[in-house]
Amino acid sequence: MKERRYDIDWLRVLAILAIWLFHCARFFDTEGWHVKNAEQSFIVDVLRAGLIWMWVMELFFLLSGVGSWYALKSRTGGQYLLERVKRLLVPLYTVGLFILIPPQFYFELVTNEGYIGTFSEVIRRYFGKFGWFRFSHTPLTLVPFPWAGHLWFLQYLFLISLVTLPLLLYLRSERGQRRIEILGRWCDRRGGIFLFVIPLAVVLIFLRWLFRGEKTWADFFYYAVFFVIGYIMPADKRFTESTKRHGWVCLALWIVGFSGIGLFISVLGYNPYLDSRSFSLIFVLAQIVISITSWSAVVFMLSLGAKYLNFKNKILAYANEAVLPFYIFHQTIILCVGWFVVRWNIGILPKFLIISVVSFFLIITLYELFVRHLNIVRFFFGMRPKKRDCKT
């Protein structure tokens, strides 16, 4: 009988809802984005960063690694890569490329470059940015796209799946299983779950200094470590037991670590995400704090799932299937709604609530009417064909 981790499914659903709320709040923080509200709030910065930003994409990649463990139980390496192409590249280069990302590119030009021309000219500029694959400071140029928006996640996940495949297959071998068993014994000790901080911190310390900016190779290998950690977790129950034992400790470390990052910025005047031009003691300490904080937040979420969410119901069955199309839809719909709402003369909280409610309703409606029941459309959203009910 095929094993099923319903807590992993629930966490995937919770993660997509978190990233949806995160993007609904982006209109109102003090950082740049594709569309901005005139009134902005530092409180929104703190809330979205402290509650969501420190863990959500890290958890997405870890859960993708868990899914790859189960996928490779019944697939060869070639079959696994073919599935990755269908699930990630097909939606990226169809509905993403031609339908969902052009409006985001338009909003970006209007908001941040003062563009006042026609949408047709925007389309020409958009496709004019398309280039051949090449090596650069970012892995995104290896999966070329004019302007990826939130679909950078699909680019990263495909490349991580491709690059790590030899390691994934090795870890399924007899020798690889012995390595996982040794690691499982280490993690079974008090504090053992924090061994995973070491590779995370090493990647940030040595790569974030070399590759500056967003979506660089530093981020790629950082997320790849989360992906591989997620891959090995189902292989030994001691990993899950360790996350359950350390959950509340990790919550405390999450809070303390996020406060520490705030101190770096507010007291020392050092932003560990931006001020990485010199390899210094403060840089090293900051990257260690970031690694501990993000890992602790992820472990806390995993512990909640393992303790309380390992069950199934009709809501989970519906939501788990909808996760990928919801992600593909969400940012474009949020931006389209917010484009109008931010112009209204009301406060931040009412605008946030309106954008959240309306965008959620539109995403689910689009999914239900145009994606869920149509196999041809499901294919373009990276979904498996819907099985027809057989009448006897």
Image (cartoon, rainbow, N blue to C red):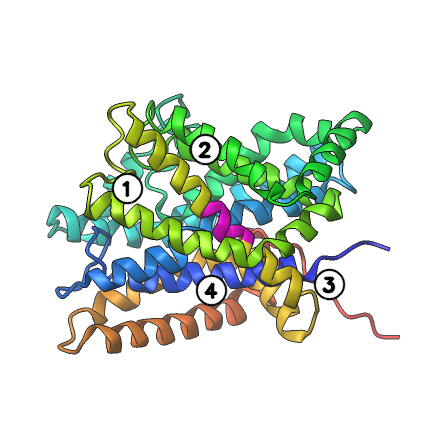
Q: Residue at x 28, y 41 (%)?
A: 126
Q: Secondary structure at mark 2?
A: helix
Q: Which amino acid type is shown beneath numbered disc 1?
A: Tyr
Which residue is nearer to you in this view: 106 or 210? Answer: 210
For the residues marked 4 and 1, what is the alpha-carbon distance in whole angstroms? 29 Å
Q: Which amino acid type is shown beneath numbered disc 2?
A: Ala
Q: Residue at x 74, y 42 (%)?
A: 235
For the residues marked 3 and 4, what is the alpha-carbon distance in whole angstroms? 27 Å
Q: Residue at x 41, y 62 (%)?
A: 20
Q: Which residue is mark 4?
A: 17
Q: Magenta part of the protein: which range?
A: 294-299
In which quadrant of the rendered image does the C terminus lie? bottom right
Choose mark 1 or mark 2, whichever is in front.
2
Q: Which amino acid type is shown beneath numbered disc 4?
A: Leu
Task: Pick whichever of labels 3 and 4 is earlier in the sequence.
Answer: 4
For the residues marked 2 and 4, what is the alpha-carbon distance in whole angstroms? 28 Å
Q: Which residue is mark 2?
A: 201
Task: Name the chief secondary structure element in magenta.
Answer: helix
For the residues marked 2 and 3, what is the alpha-carbon distance in whole angstroms? 45 Å
